[in-house]
Each structure stands twice: as structure tokens, then as C-alpha cells.
Image (spheres, rainbow, N blue to C red):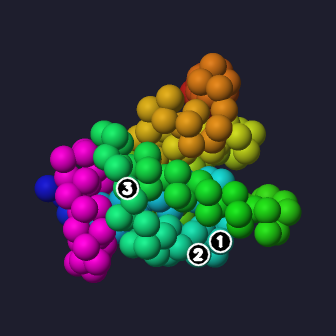
Amino acid sequence: MNELSEKFVVTTDTDVLDPYIARIADHDKDALAQLYHLTSGSVYGFALSMLKNTEDAEDVLQDTYLSIYASASGYRSMGKPLAWILRITRNLCLMKLRDRKKIAATPLEELNLSFDNAPLMTHEDRIVLKSCMQYLSKEEAQIVMLRAVSGFKHREIADFLALPLSTVLSKYHRAIKKIKILFKGEESK
């Protein structure tokens, strides 16, 4: 195991996450810490992709786990514990957006920080993705981040962003096409 994969563990496995949520319902703070360790990278990446602001994303990250602790007793497993966690995150992001009534633009440097927490990406992947994000629209970048950085399926992204699956697919494919064109241009230089 390399140093990066030892530092970050990401799982969407129901068999792993559901027992932690059940223990959290019994107010087990160690279970909350373990759940945080397993899912915080995805939660933070998702919050940052919605809020476009690192401070707000960090606030929502913390609020998400406080909400999980408070509402774990009402959780009913339907085979998608990470989807439940990200719905909490999404709702908190929407409340934060309503509070400030606008989406602030994220400086590229701040967006790049979220790539550093992506456990499934190699160093080369991060470099390529960082350079490509500046050529994508905000929504395309958000979809690519959720797919490439957090590893979500298109259907899950559509659920999280409350967009039709066809829209997510078309925006994702358009973004990939832009990236391919960018690289073809770079190769010919």
C-alpha cells in the first residue's frame, strides 16, 4: 500500500458503513470518527463542488457529521449509506447557498486543494485534471470532479445535483471532449 492510500480510505460499501451508522445511533463517538475517516474526502469534495468556497465546504463538512450524529437513529439502510450522507451534505450546502444567495467563484488554487484529498487519483492524474478544469464550465467541472475525484457513478451525480441523468451524461461527455481536444492541441505543439 502506498503512503497516499494509507492516509485516505474511501468506501461506499454498505456492509462497512451501515454498522458505523448503527453504532452512531447509539451515540458511539468512535464510530463517528471511523465514518468520518472513511467518507470525509467524498463529503468535502462534494461540498466544495457545490459551494465553490473552501471555508464554506469545511463548515458543511463538520455540520454534516454533526447532523449524522444527531439523525443516525432515523437512518434506514436502503443499500446506499453514502448517498444518505451526501444528501445531508447537499441539503446543508443548499441552506448555505440560500444564506449567501449566490455562488462565489472558486479560485483555481482553492479548487486544486480538493484534488490533494482524492485518494483514488495518482499524482499524474491530479496534474492533468487540475490543468483541465480551467477549460470547463462550472457545472462541467463539478460533474468531472464528482466522477473523477470522488468516483461517483453518473446516476449518483444526477441524484446529488438534482439534474436529469441525460444532462449529467451530456455535460460529462462534453467536458471529456473538451479535454481531448485540449490534449490533441498540446500534442501537436
Q: Is residue 59 above or below residue 68?
A: below
Q: Foreground mark, 2 or 3?
A: 3
Residue 28 in sight in this render: yes
Residue type for callout 1: Asp
Is disc 2 in contact with disc 1, using a CB cutoff of under 8 Å? Answer: yes
Q: Looking at the image, which residue is at 79% across and 69% down?
A: 99
Which residue lies under the disc numbered 3?
75
The disc, 2 or 3, on the residue closer to the chain's N-terminal end is 2
Position in image of residue 84 (x %, y %): 44, 50
Q: Nearer the viewer, mark 3 or mark 1?
A: 3
Position of 149 compared to 5: left or right? right
Using the numbered discs, state the Cα–Cα distance from disc 2 to disc 3 in whole angstroms: 23 Å
Quadrant of the image containing the C terminus: top right
Question: At numbered mark 3, what does the secondary structure look like: helix, strand or loop?
Answer: loop
For residue 104, what is the image quadrant? bottom right
Residue at the spot 62% in from the left edge and 63% down from the top edge: 92
Disc assigned to residue 59: 2
Queried whether the magenta region covers residue 27, the answer comes back as: yes
Query: Which image quarter holds the N terminus?
Result: bottom left
